[in-house]
Structures are given as structure tokens and as C-alpha cells.
Image: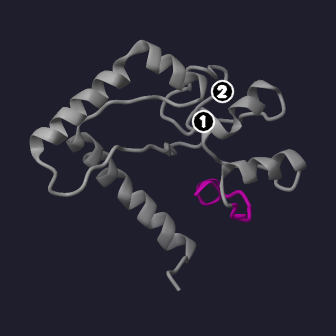
């Protein structure tokens, strides 16, 4: 996606995960990587890596000197990873709502927020409806990326 939107010539090198990509960067096998902040944070703080931009809409609080992609000259490039707590379909609505309320309360706790921030992540509490809406908003972006890549299930 980055290469396509910027015109950079690049070859996607698939790794099994962020730690393998990070090892490739530190060895000099690859020249840049777009990955989740927790994977790179210790090496960024230690000066072994340099962050060129963050893909969030706002600057990352723990790395205020690192611009967003828009600030770095790549508009409309907000790509963040996120997870959601899921339950089996058919779980009674009161159970879903109770779990949702508990998760939102935990995510709002300043001590938990601080612990998450130290690892380069954030605890965000939303409703099931908000999580479903976010997934629906992001789905077209990922569908287009897959289509444009030529990837198939074969």
C-alpha cells in the first residue's frame, strides 16, 4: 500500500511476523518496514531504528517528534492495527453489554492506560456497534489492497 500510494519502488518481503521483519531490518537485509509500534519501540528508543512516520491519524504520544504520514507527505494514509474482544454469535445481549461495559471501564483506567502506553499500544473501549462500524469502514481499504496485490486463494 505504501509503495503504491507513494510511487516508491519496493518489493514486498513476507515475514512470519514483526520480530522476523525487525531482525531483517537490524541485519540490513531490508531497507524499511511498516509494522506495529510495539515490535520496534525498544529499538526506536535505543537508537537502533529511526521512525520516519506513524500511520495513526495523530502523532503517537510517546514519540511526539515523529510525524504522521500526512505530515510526512503521504495524505490519507491512516492504517492502524486493532483488536476486539469477541463472543460466540447468539450470546445473550445482557451478557454482551455487561462485558462491553467492563472492558470500557478497564480501558478508561489511567493505570492501565499507562501500562499499555509503555508498550506502544493503547487500550480503547468502544461498544460492539462502534467496533462493527470500524470494521465496516476499513473493509473496503483492505479489499482494494488485496485486489491490487493480485493475491489469490490458490
| 68 lies left or right of 86 | right
Q: Which mark is first along the chain, 2 or 1?
A: 1
Q: Which residue is mark 2?
A: 66
Whether residue 7 is in magenta: the answer is yes
Q: Which residue is mark 1?
A: 54
Please provide percent x and percent y for residue 90: 14, 56
Residue 7 numbered tag: none
> Which residue is pictured at 62% across the width and 54% down the height?
2
Whether residue 104 is in magenta: the answer is no
Please provide percent x and percent y for residue 19: 71, 48
Please provide percent x and percent y for residue 123: 42, 29
Under circle 1, the secondary element is loop
Please provide percent x and percent y for residue 20: 74, 53
> Which residue is pictured at 74% across the width and 62% down the height?
9
- Magenta residues, as a range? 1-15
Q: Residue furthest top?
A: 110
Q: Residue furthest right?
A: 27
* Marks 1/2: CA–CA distance: 7 Å
| 49 lies left or right of 129 | right
> Which residue is pictured at 49% across the width and 43% down the height?
80
Total numbered labels: 2
Dot 1, how many residues are within 10 Å of its Cα: few (below 14), some (14-19), or many (20+)? many
Image quarter of residue 129? top left
**Viewer-closest of 36 and 67:** 36
Quarter of the picture containing the N terminus is bottom right
Whether tag 1 and tag 2 are in contact, CB under 8 A, the answer is yes
**Viewer-closest of 53 and 34:** 34
Under circle 2, the secondary element is loop
> Which residue is pictured at 62% across the width and 29% down the height?
67
- Asked if 18 appears above or below 119 in the picture, the reply is below
- Asked if 115 appears above or below 98 in the picture, the reply is above
Amino acid at each position: 500500500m505504501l509503495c503504491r500510494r507513494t510511487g516508491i519502488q519496493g518489493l514486498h518481503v513476507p515475514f512470519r511476523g514483526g520480530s522476523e521483519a525487525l531482525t531483517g531490518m537490524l541485519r540490513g537485509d531490508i531497507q524499511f518496514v511498516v509494522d506495529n509500534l510495539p515490535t520496534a519501540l525498544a529499538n526506536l528508543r535505543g537508537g537502533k531504528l529511526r521512525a520516519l512516520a506513524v500511520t495513526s491519524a495523530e502523532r503517537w504520544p510517546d514519540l511526539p517528534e515523529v510525524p504522521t504520514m500526512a505530515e510526512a507527505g503521504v495524505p490519507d494514509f491512516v492504517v492502524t492495527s486493532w483488536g476486539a474482544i469477541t463472543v460466540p454469535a447468539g450470546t445473550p445481549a445482557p451478557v454482551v453489554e455487561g462485558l462491553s461495559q467492563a472492558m470500557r471501564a478497564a480501558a478508561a483506567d489511567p493505570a492501565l492506560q499507562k501500562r499499555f502506553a509503555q508498550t506502544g499500544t493503547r487500550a480503547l473501549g468502544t461498544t460492539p456497534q462502534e467496533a462493527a462500524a470500524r470494521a465496516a469502514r476499513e473493509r473496503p481499504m483492505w479489499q482494494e489492497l488485496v485486489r491490487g496485490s493480485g493475491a489469490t486463494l490458490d
